[in-house]
Image (cartoon, grey):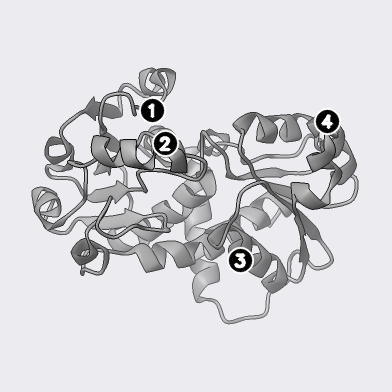
Amino acid sequence: MKPRHFVTFLDLSGAEVRSLISRATELKHSKAIYEPLKNKVLGMIFEKSSTRTRVSFETGMIQFGGGAIFLSPRDTQLGRGEPVDDSARVLSRMVDAIMLRTISHRTVEIFAEHSRVPVINGLSDRFHPCQVLADMQTYFENRGDIAGKTVAWIGDGNNMCQTYIHAAQQLGFTLNIACPEGYEPELELIEEAATFVNLSRDPFAAAEGADLVVTDVWASMGQEEEQALRAKAFANYQVDSKLMAAAAPNALFMHCLPAHRGEEVSAEVMEGPQSVVWDEAENRLHAQKALLEFLLNPQT
């Protein structure tokens, strides 16, 4: 039987996402020793540096009774030109699941195509489904189901934004995206989710009445050379108290971190009462534990 993968948010149905969120919250509050992945190993490939992704996956595997192996291209044959599909074939004969944090989304796709075990996208240049799974858990915990709600994405149409497009499709919320010209998400993704997505240049129009406001850094990893150009392009896209005032009175604010206070978000909003960024960060652990359990122990 072919393994289930989590390469994009569309790999899970809306019902499966809701089930995982419920399970993640159960695991979050449980104090019992529970080791469903005892003696199982997660291989973790990192082409990009990481704090939350590495620590949450390693901790999750340890708490579940298993283990995790950190693999860097600098220390493996991947960094010396071994074909990605060959690496996938070899690693998937030795570990029970593979998580990749990669530069190119195609790397994750190739691993999934050739792997005997579940492959998880821990971040790629196009999508970040694990983070949005944690974001959705955080919203559900604080406000209930997100179906029928409005989410405002303010800033770069990056991998996070594109994953929110998928989440809107699967969970049935409206996504208002505000970004400067030239920084839009992929047109094909917008067209596929046209029923759920609105694209504009006006951050205040996007945030009007929103139940959740989300942003990310203006220059992601690998875009540091564009910092000055992007700072100019995004100057009017900071999430501050004025923009939050345009949202619904009980709107939440999220940021996947790390955050640059004074750039994409003001310190006042980041540390304010509507911000749930620390719960959001913690939920990476719980959401991913539920995901690992689902992919490795589907009968649970």
Q: Which residue is mark 3?
A: 55
Q: Which residue is mark 1?
A: 185
42 versus 66 height, above or below: above
CA gap, disc 3 and disc 2: 23 Å
Question: Label 1 is placed on what type of residue?
Answer: Pro
Mark identifier at residue 221 = none
Q: Nearer the viewer, residue 146 or 59?
A: 59
Q: Residue at x 28, y 36 (%)?
A: 175
CA gap, disc 4 and disc 1: 29 Å
Q: Residue at x 17, y 43 (%)?
A: 207
Quick one: quadrant of the C terminus? bottom right
Element carrying mark 4: loop
- Percent position of residue 185, x then y: 38, 28
Question: Label 4 is placed on what type of residue?
Answer: Pro
Image side of residue 275 versus residue 202, left or right = right
Q: Which residue is mark 2?
A: 158
Q: Which one is in front in this view, the residue at disc 3 or the one at disc 4?
A: 4
Q: Residue at x 62, y 41 (%)?
A: 6
Q: Residues within 10 Å of mark 4 (few under 14, many from 20)?
A: few
Question: Label 3 is placed on what type of residue?
Answer: Val
Q: Which residue is mark 4?
A: 83
Image side of residue 243 versus residue 138, left or right = left
Element carrying mark 3: helix
